[in-house]
Each structure stands twice: as C-alpha cells, then as structure tokens.
Image (cartoon, rainbow, N blue to C red):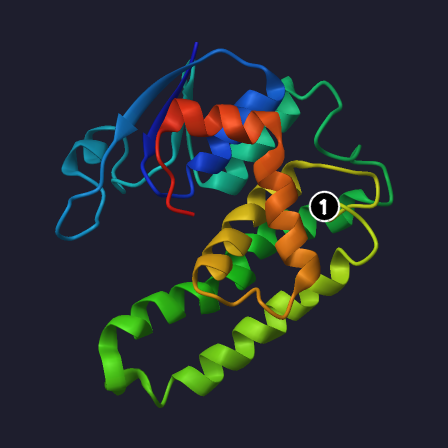
Amino acid sequence: MITVHHLNNSRSHRILWMLEELGLDYNLVVHHRDAETNLAPPELLKIHPLGKSPVLIDGDKTIIESGAILEYLTRTYGKGKFAPDISSSEYIEYSQLMHYAEGSAMLPIMLRLYAGRLGDAAAPLMPRIDSETQNHLGYLNGLIEGQDYFLKSGFSAADIQLSFVLEAANIQGQLAPFKNLQACVARNKARPAYQRALERGGPYAF
C-alpha cells in the first residue's frame, strides 16, 4: 500500500491528484502547518530528515520531491498514460517541463512571497522579481496557446507539476494578463481527480 505524508496548503496536493488520476489506493497521513509560523510540524522529521512534504512511501521506497514522486508514479503505475514514451519526440519537452516547474518557474513566485513580508525594505528587489515573474508566466502562456494542456498530445504529469506554479501565481494576482493560464487553472480544477484529491486532502488555499 502506498502511503503519502501530506501537508495542508502545500505542493503535496499534486501527489494526491496524480494518485486519483491513476485510480490507486493509498494511505493518507495528513500533517498541519503551525498556526503561527506556517511551517511544517516537527513530526515530519520522523518521516524524512528534511521534515518536508510530500513524502511518498511505497514498499521499501521512500521518495521526496514532487517531480520525482510524479515521475515514479507515472513510470511505475501509469501504464503508458500521463507521460510520453521516452522514445517519442515529445518526451524531452515533457522532461524539461517537469524540471522547469520547480527549477526555474517557482523561484520568482517564492521570492515574491518572502519579499512581501519585508514591506518597504523589499522595494529594491521588486522590479527584478516582477520582471522574472512576467517572463516565466509569459513563456508558459505562450506554450499553452491554442491547446488545453502543455503537451500537444494532451494531459500529462507535467500539467500536474506546473499546477502549483500557476495556482500560487494566481493567488498573488499575477495571472490577470495571461488568459491562457487562467483557463488552464480552471480546467485543472474541474477535473474529477483534482476534486477527489481535495476531498481526501482537505482544504487547499490555492
């Protein structure tokens, strides 16, 4: 049985969503952020030394990092769905998007979150943060032009991996100029598996 250590209002919603897309049974252990610090609880340190979520346990395997977990689930249980075949011309695009989500796109979103807590002291940083945010969102908006999902072949794990970037940008009010990305967020949230993940994982601020 797969076990997921899930933290409320976090990237780990993506893992529940993928498990629901795959139709897999799983044991869910829900952890809650500290009400004052908004940090993960210390109990997660007993699961993994980093004390972060998501953590997926499948038999003797303990896997961290959303992208690695999604790739593992797709490769192990996907039966050819949710990722292009590694020999296909689309696979490199898929692989890039899986890494790009956290490796590049999420950085200005997180910088905006933390800089926002500095008040006026963050003013010198904001032009660069704004520029990088618009750069990445503009790139993603162009990728999805004329199609429903980020790959021409259809919905994939890359859409799930990128969803947190879009949801976090949306809650910051950054998607207003990007109609394609707004539509993408709405389309993702309408998927039955996304809704089932919400029911299992509990309230999700994004």
Residue 106 vertical position relative to residue 70 in the rendered view, above or below: below
Residue 29, horizontal then vertical, whole percent: 30, 22
Residue, x 43% and y 47% (percent of image)?
206
Residue 143 vertical position relative to residue 188 in the rendered view, above or below: below
- The residue pinned by badge 1 equals 94
Residue extending farthest to the right is 89
Which quadrant holds the N terminus?
A: top left
Lateral position of residue 143 relative to residue 50, left or right:
right
Residue 102, horizontal then vertical, whole percent: 51, 54
- Image quadrant where residue 126 sits: bottom left
Residue 185 vertical position relative to residue 70 in the rendered view, above or below: below
Tag 1: residue type? Tyr
Lateral position of residue 204 relative to residue 187, left or right:
left
Residue, x 37% and y 45% (percent of image)?
205
Residue 50, horizontal then vertical, whole percent: 27, 42
Residue, x 78% and y 35% (percent of image)?
84
The residue lying toward the viewer, choosing from 92 and 134, is 134
Query: Disc 1 on helix, strand or loop?
Result: helix
